[in-house]
Image: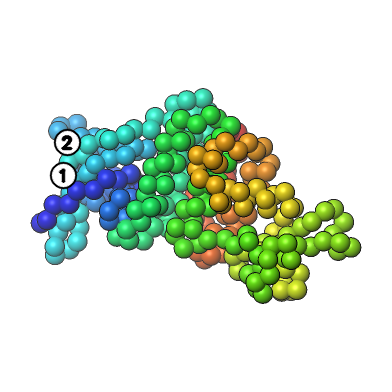
């Protein structure tokens, strides 16, 4: 069996048999990899330990006949303790990012840019001030979806191609400033002319759309400097998760449980 070396992070580990487990990694060079860790749960194991929320160097053998991988060596390259102020919130956001990847990454589909984005996100989640965690996660969520092929369009109407300003609801039709309508099903803004009866829309104030667009275009480091309250973050997160539900046709992604975790964490 050929030996493979990768850098990776653990997405999920499931106990298997008496002393083993099945571990799903997101690797830098081969994407999602499901590998059997034989004897890894045994106290007698002399191999390096697996650590969630860390950047690991792993070596494993791949069976040419079955394609099954078997872990042989582990080295921790960088550990993210998430122990600064707001630990529960840091754990919640970090867990949500890994749940999102576990649910949506295809097996053995290399995504090196997304991998390094995720490492940067975990690093910033470990070190950033507590008030930075919410905008940081929202920016990561938007960018991760884009890498996975689900990029929401906030630049203009997805129906006719009108620009953002032309897609707004203004004037006599709007009693309180400028509004936009976002359709999770079609994945973007829609102007009043292109709206379809019975389609679900999320109404966005101009200021909220500005915030979402800024998170979409900012780097993670820039996003961590943004300040927002929980109400604003909740509204943006609900929009993004609604978009993800429609686009992936998933009724209940594990990552959507993050909403409940977030409220309990009270970050």
* Residue receiving disc 2: 47
- In the figure, 83 relative to 182: above or below? above
The way the protein has been coloured in the rendering is rainbow
- Dividing the image into 4 quarters, which one contains the N terminus? bottom left
**Residue at the spot 20% in from the left edge and 58% down from the top edge:** 68
Q: Is residue 204 visible?
A: yes
**Residue at the spot 51% in from the left edge and 25% down from the top edge:** 85
* Residue receiving disc 1: 72
Q: Position of residue 15 (x, y in %)?
A: 29, 45
Q: Position of residue 199 (x, y in %)?
A: 69, 70
Q: Quadrant of residue 192?
A: bottom right
Q: Between residues 114 and 237, which one lies in front from this camera angle? A: 114
Q: Which mark sits nearer the N-terminus, 1 or 2?
A: 2
Q: Is residue 257 visible?
A: no
Mark 1 closeness class: few <14, some 14–19, many ≥20 residues within 10 Å: some
- Dividing the image into 4 quarters, which one contains the C terminus? top right
- Residue 255 vs residue 78: left or right? right
- In the figure, 174 relative to 60: above or below? below
Q: Position of residue 233 (x, y in %)?
A: 63, 43
- Residue 75 vs residue 267: left or right? left
Q: Residue furthest left?
A: 1
- Residue 20 vs residue 124: left or right? left
Look at the numbered discs 1 and 2 and tell me whether their residues touch, using CB distance below 8 Å.
Answer: yes
- Residue 41 vs residue 11: left or right? left
Secondary structure beneath label 2:
loop
């Amino acid at each position: 069996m050929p030996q493979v070396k990768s850098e990776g992070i653990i997405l999920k580990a499931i106990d298997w048999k008496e002393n083993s487990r099945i571990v799903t990694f997101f690797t830098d060079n081969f994407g999602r990899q499901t590998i059997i860790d034989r004897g890894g749960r045994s106290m007698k194991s002399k191999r390096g330990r697996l650590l969630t929320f860390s950047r690991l160097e792993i070596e494993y053998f791949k069976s040419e006949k079955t394609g099954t991988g078997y872990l042989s060596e582990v080295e921790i390259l960088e550990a993210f303790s998430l122990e600064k102020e707001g630990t529960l919130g840091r754990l919640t956001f970090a867990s949500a990012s890994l749940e999102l990847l576990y649910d949506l990454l295809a097996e053995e589909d290399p995504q090196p840019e997304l991998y390094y984005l995720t490492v940067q996100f975990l690093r910033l989640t470990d070190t950033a001030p507590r008030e930075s965690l919410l905008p940081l996660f929202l920016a990561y969520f938007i960018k991760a979806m884009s890498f996975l092929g689900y990029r929401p369009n906030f630049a203009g109407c997805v129906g006719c191609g009108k620009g953002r300003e032309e897609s707004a609801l203004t004037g006599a039709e709007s009693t309180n400033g400028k509004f936009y309508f976002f359709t999770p099903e079609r994945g973007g803004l829609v102007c009043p002319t292109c709206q379809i009866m019975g389609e679900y829309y999320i109404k966005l104030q101009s200021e909220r759309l500005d915030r979402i667009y800024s998170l979409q275009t900012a780097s993670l480091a820039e996003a961590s400097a943004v300040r927002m309250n929980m109400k604003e973050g909740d509204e943006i997160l609900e929009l993004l998760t609604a978009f993800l539900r429609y686009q992936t046709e998933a009724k209940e992604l594990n990552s959507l449980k993050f909403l409940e975790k977030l409220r309990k964490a009270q970050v």
